[in-house]
Amino acid sequence: MLILSPKQEWFGNIRGDILAGIVVALALIPEAIAFSIIAGVDPKVGLYASFCIATVIAFVGGRAGMISAATGAMALLMVTLVKEHGLQYLMAATLLTGVLQIVAGYLKLGVLMSFVSRTVVIGFVNALAILIFMAQLPELTNVTWHVYALTAAGLGIIYLFPYIPKLGTLIPSPLVTIVVLTAVTVVMGIDVRTVGDMGQLPDTLPIFLWPEVPFNFETLSIIFPYSAALAAVGLLESFMTATIIDDMTDTDSDKNREAKGQGIANIASGCMGGMAGCAMIGQSVINIKSGGRGRLSTLVVGVLLLIMVVFMSDLIKIIPMAALVAVMIMVSIGTFSWASIKGLKTLPLSTNIVMLSTVFVVVGTHNLALGVFTGVLLASLFFANKISHLMYWDKSFEETSSTRIYKFIGQIFFNSADRFADAFDYKEEVKNVVIDVTRAHFWDITAVYALDKAVIKLRKMGKEVEVIGQNEATQTIIDRFGVHDKPAEIEKMMGGH
């Protein structure tokens, strides 16, 4: 993948980044308010958080062009804390979340993304696309026909405007949609739900706030479980989003730097009276599809968001929600991997099960971490089962020395260990047994235990047993954990004293 220089990250796409930033900032306002309502806090908490996180992450994040702010996944984890202990404890938990994420960055936990298969990523993307669409349904139920007409018109502008010669490539179609539909509703006096109906917008700039909580072990015991969950979900969603944007832009990102950046941004948010946040796949996709590529787009989102909600609230309030719903439906359609539907007929059953399980768990629980964990677990189990079947053996017999030779080929670990032990004919009348593992590899203690079990059982049957051909790694693990050549250990294992 292409690696951009700092200059390219900031100034390689100035016009595209600024225009895309405007679109994302407008689309972010109702979401930030909605996420604040989910968490049970004032709308300004989500808006201040989104401003702080987006602005800070533009400088310290590990992925150019990715948008971070207050998110629904994080808001769901805050509900109980806010209800039982209040806003001040939420701010303290936000600060601790940032600290934990910075520690995760220095521990290089970004490498954990290597354990997430492509199938799980596709399932994650599809689930998010479905959730984004479902989040728009409240704005499309129990409404007048005007809302449906405006939404349909908005989608028409989004998809058809790019085909207009010259002008279609200069201005992002989502921005045109927002401006045109707002003008139509104002001029024609159409009475539909607007951004102003979502909640009260703040009218002052954020100020430095330190959580008014006692700094003792009791407070730590209250906020730590929430902070740990917020840090884990935030990093997972940020890493997954970064991976998706990497693919969309054919560029690379630094996951460990992203972890540190998310931590710093959340600390800034907590110090400004905001809530914890993370990368947003929906807004990030809007940014990319609107032409945003660099860090400038993320900075524009943060700065413009604050300017709009504080100084331009009268204009922002009149934007019809139907315009933003049209934009989010576009995001949902563009995010969903339609190729995965065709893949259900051609891909292996195990691959489809992993993808669909990830989708169902995420959509059913609205818990991104649980869905990804389910996908990774199933993918690991299917992989282990597949690899275990690649272990096989052959046997031969030397009559002159009455020796039975077992030759093993493949990977011997917890899922193939029983098949290894069952390969031997323990009752066969032979003097000597040679276990040849030249073309095999022992991976774990379960494999070593299976070898011990086989050797000890063969020797109890009166046979001389020799193990040959261990590679260096196999020899090391056998020497460290094996007992078949250690009489004292065998006696202890058999219950002797």
Image (spheres, grey):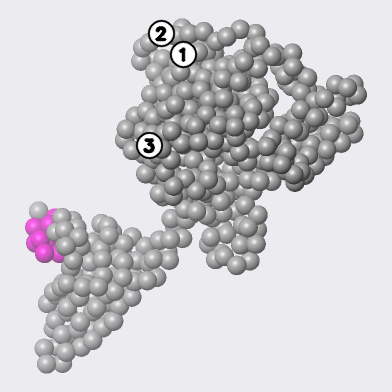
Q: What secondary structure is found at the residue carrying circle 2? A: loop
Question: Of the residues shown, which amino acid type is indicated by label 2?
Answer: Pro
State if disc 2 and disc 1 touch (CB < 8 Å): no
Q: Is residue 218 something that shows in the picture?
A: yes
Is the residue 388 above or below the residue 183 in the image?
below
Q: Residue at x 49, y 40 (%)?
A: 242
Residue mark closest to the camera, 1 vs 2: 1
Decide whether residue 488 is among the magenta residues: yes
Nearer to us in this view, 397 or 281: 281
Dot 1 corresponds to which residue? 271
Measure the alpha-carbon separation of dots 1 and 2: 16 Å
| Crowding near the residue tagged with mark 2, few <14, some 14–19, many ≥20 C-alpha atoms within 10 Å | few
Dot 3 corresponds to which residue? 256
User: What segment is highlighted magenta in the picture?
Assistant: 482-494
Decide whether residue 196 is among the magenta residues: no
Question: Of the residues shown, which amino acid type is indicated by label 1?
Answer: Cys
